[in-house]
Amino acid sequence: MTTAPLRVAVLASGRGSNLAALLQARSRGELPAEFVLVGSDKADAGALTLAREAGIPTAVLDPRRFPDRVSFDHTLFERIQESGAELLVLAGFMRIIDGAALAPWVGRMINIHPSLLPKYRGLHTHRRALAAGDLEHGASVHYVTAELDGGPVIAQARLAITPQDDEQTLAARLLGYEHRLLPAVVSYIAQGRLALRDGQVLLDGRPLATPLQWRDGALDR
């Protein structure tokens, strides 16, 4: 019996490098997913170009055309629902989403964030890690809840901070880790291995005590 690919929607505000990583993983046969929608709040987002080149439907909503954030978010999520998506991936979507709009998607919505959560929620994570004198930095994939970057963490990738690092070099080095971490997590979800129940991440039906770690090219406990 063949299992249908997971139907995935992606939201992005920028160039779409994490979307590109997801599409490349699918092309390599590592990600059993069908991308049904790429949405953005920026008409010139590179992610939209990538989607169109790949034949993926797109949706662009201009926040300035809506009376408030809530109406924008609810309209956006209506489009996502209409796409038939089973999983929603935030891949550089630079907006805070209304809690009521995302509530039906809790457990079906993940985000990749450039820090070792719970450290450095929000913006400027590389700068903040350097300013704090941290010896390591990283990226986290987490389930999305109404709390900003506060949902249960699924998996992380870590890298050492070197004395030569500045904000730009650290961000560039971390991006390569993000591009491997996110597809690996989406693949686990597509295989039915990950779920969220009562605020607890489950791996293969069992509670995950600590986030999975990206090591030696794979996710590991």
Image (tube, rainbow, N blue to C red):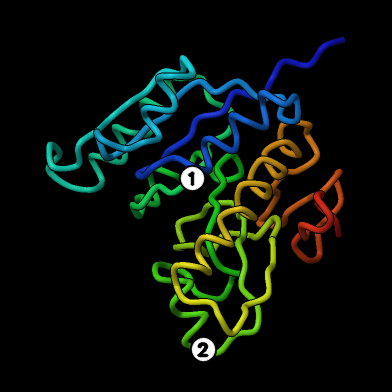
Q: Secondary structure at mark 2?
A: loop
Which residue occupies 12% across, 36% down? Answer: 65
Comes first in the chain, label 1 or label 2: 1
Q: At 67% from the left edge and 39% from the top edge, which residue is drawn?
A: 186
Q: State the quadrant of the C terminus.
A: bottom right
Asked where in the image residue 32 lies, by quadrant, the reply is top right
Q: At which x and y percent is residue 123? A: 39, 67
Q: Amino acid at mark 1?
A: Ala
Please give the name of the residue rendered at 53% of the width and 62% of the height, measured from the top-left corner: 114
| Between 85 and 137, the one nearer to me in the picture | 137
Q: Are marks 1 and 2 in contact (CB under 8 Å)?
A: no
Q: Closer to the camera, 42 or 147?
A: 42
Question: What residue sits 17% from the left and 47% below the top?
Answer: 68
Could you say whether the residue bearing mark 1 is in a helix, strand or loop?
loop
Measured along the vertical axis of the image, is residue 108 above or below residue 158? above
Q: Which residue is mark 2?
A: 132
Disc assigned to residue 103: none
Q: Is residue 117 above or below residue 109?
A: below
In the image, residue 139 above or below residue 112: below
Q: CA distance from mark 1 to mark 2?
A: 26 Å
Query: Of the numbered discs in the image, which one, if any, rests on residue 91?
Result: 1
